[in-house]
Image: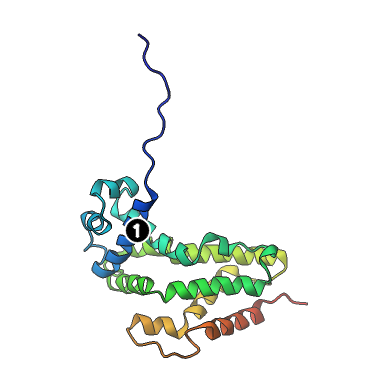
């Protein structure tokens, strides 16, 4: 009898709901206990899955941490928001969508907790700091730099140094409110916290980089 030469199909597909539960658990536990204080067992327990399931989705804790940071960023800043396309409306509206998403992300309780954790652990763990930067801030900067380059080519903006401008833009959006959140100072209810703050940043940015006649 000949051997069965039928090609074997892929393994059992991974359950997206379990993956989401693991990421949600990691978002809660990493900022609460710190990177070193969280085990894969703890995340499995918090997510209501087995440790084997955690490892089937994420090969190690570094990978899980990186994917957790990426997932948090993508919740409010999906890749689509960085597509500089004429059909998406005036450039101001496109910039407003990016600014609003980033503002909501950076002031969210999870992001503030992650930043506090990194401030506490970053000095003792340069590798962790690099990992956080690469999958979080740098990915956002890269995406916005590409957006600005596309806007330059389309004639919507005139930005001589897109990388530097991207850094300026996000630092302006953070503003006073992000600093107050990090140090546990109550938000002041002023224009630094909401749409007025975003509009003021957009006004500055567009004055600096509007196409020249």
Residue on which the image places disc 1: 23
Q: Residue at x 68, y 71 (%)?
A: 90
Q: Where residue 141 appears, x then y in whole percent?
A: 51, 66
Give whichever of 92, 133 is nearer the camera: 92
Q: Is residue 166 left or right of residue 47?
A: right
Q: Residue at x 51, y 80 (%)?
A: 172
Q: Where residue 113 appears, x then y in whole percent?
A: 33, 73
Give whichever of 165, 83 is nearer the camera: 83
Give whichever of 174, 168 is nearer the camera: 174
Which part of the image, by quadrant, shows the N terminus? top left
Q: Is residue 158 left or right of residue 97?
A: right
Q: Where residue 47 appears, x then y in whole percent?
A: 28, 57
State the image quarter where residue 154 is shown.
bottom right
Which part of the image, by quadrant, shows the C terminus? bottom right
Q: Where residue 96 appears, x then y in whole percent?
A: 58, 75
Give whichever of 19, 159 is nearer the camera: 19
Is residue 30 visible to us here? yes
Q: Residue at x 47, y 84 (%)?
A: 193
Q: Residue at x 66, y 62 (%)?
A: 85
């Amino acid at each position: 009898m000949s051997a069965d030469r039928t090609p074997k199909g892929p393994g059992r597909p991974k359950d997206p709901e379990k993956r989401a539960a693991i990421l949600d658990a990691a978002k809660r536990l990493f900022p609460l206990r710190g990177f070193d204080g969280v085990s894969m067992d703890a995340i499995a327990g918090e997510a209501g899955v087995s440790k084997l399931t955690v490892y089937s989705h994420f090969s190690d804790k570094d990978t899980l941490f990186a994917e957790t940071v990426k997932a948090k960023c993508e919740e409010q800043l999906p890749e689509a928001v960085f597509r500089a396309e004429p059909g998406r409306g005036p450039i101001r509206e496109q910039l407003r969508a990016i600014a609003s998403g980033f503002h909501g992300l950076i002031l969210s309780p999870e992001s503030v907790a992650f930043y506090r954790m990194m401030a506490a652990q970053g000095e003792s763990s340069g590798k962790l700091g690099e990992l956080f930067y690469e999958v979080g801030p740098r990915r956002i900067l890269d995406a916005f730099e590409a957006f600005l380059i596309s806007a330059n080519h389309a004639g919507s903006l005139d930005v001589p140094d897109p990388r530097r401008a991207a850094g300026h833009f996000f630092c302006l959006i953070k503003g006073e409110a992000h600093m107050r959140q990090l140090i546990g100072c109550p938000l002041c209810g002023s224009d630094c916290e909401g749409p007025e703050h975003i509009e003021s940043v957009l006004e500055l940015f567009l004055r600096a980089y509007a196409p020249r006649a």
